[in-house]
Image (cartoon, grey):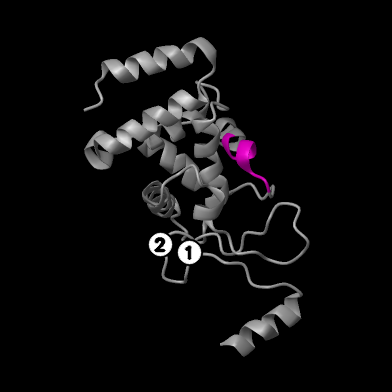
């Protein structure tokens, strides 16, 4: 095993990067993802390492959602798969709207969503970078916390994270709302 790793280092000129094991439910998708602007070598995409703002459970749920709508099972959601997804979510989009949704997070300009690009939608939503009336915002609403599945502690973490991301006066309103809801 050590000899194989040394041979790989010799071929690639660098040590293998640590990441989830082959059986990990997070990290199986996007194996072909390269780092944006990378130096030619292909790097294994590790969602848990790059998207630390999400719990492993959230990442698994997002991966499950991604796989559900990846009808071609090719590791991408193309325009037609996105169209079907948005229709099933009750937020149908025009052809141009769908293209714009993809364009907003399509870092490799291949006109389809990889799992990494799919996760970028939720990152942008959490950072408040999506317009309220955009298709991506409608899609990101799926990430809203469900207390029945996350539990009260998960809800508390969710709202505390929201308070940290909210600027100025809105922050104090969020804190008041969080305390009024009771923290048992």
Q: Give the percent coordinates (x, y) of residue 143.
A: 40, 37
- The quarter of the image holding the C terminus is top left
Q: How many marks?
A: 2
Q: Give the percent coordinates (x, y) of residue 104.
A: 63, 36
Q: Nearer the viewer, residue 107 or 175?
A: 175
Secondary structure found at label 1: loop
Which residues are the magenta region? 101-107
Secondary structure found at label 2: loop
Does 166 sit above or below residue 38? above
Residue that label 1 marks: 28
Q: Give the percent coordinates (x, y) of residue 79.
A: 54, 44
Q: Quadrant of residue 45?
A: bottom right
Q: Is residue 77 visible?
A: no
Residue at the image point whose x is 60% and y is 37% from the top:
99
Residue that label 2 marks: 25
- The quarter of the image holding the N terminus is bottom right
């Amino acid at each position: 095993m050590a000899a194989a790793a040394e041979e790989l280092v010799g071929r690639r000129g660098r040590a293998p990067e640590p990441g989830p094991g082959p059986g990990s439910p997070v990290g199986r998708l996007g194996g072909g993802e390269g780092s944006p602007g990378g130096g030619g070598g292909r790097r294994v995409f590790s969602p848990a390492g790059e998207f630390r703002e999400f719990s492993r459970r959230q990442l698994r749920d997002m991966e499950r959602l991604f796989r559900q709508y990846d009808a071609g099972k090719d590791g991408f959601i193309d325009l037609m798969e996105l169209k079907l997804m948005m229709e099933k979510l009750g937020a149908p989009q025009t052809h141009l709207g769908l293209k714009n949704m993809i364009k907003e997070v399509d870092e490799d300009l291949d006109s389809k969503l990889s799992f990494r690009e799919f996760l970028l939608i939720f990152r942008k939503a959490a950072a408040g970078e999506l317009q309220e009336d955009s298709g991506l915002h409608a899609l990101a609403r799926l990430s809203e916390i469900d207390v029945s599945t996350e539990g009260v502690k998960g809800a508390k973490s969710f709202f505390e994270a929201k308070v940290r991301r909210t600027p100025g006066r809105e922050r104090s309103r969020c804190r008041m709302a969080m305390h009024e809801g009771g923290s048992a």
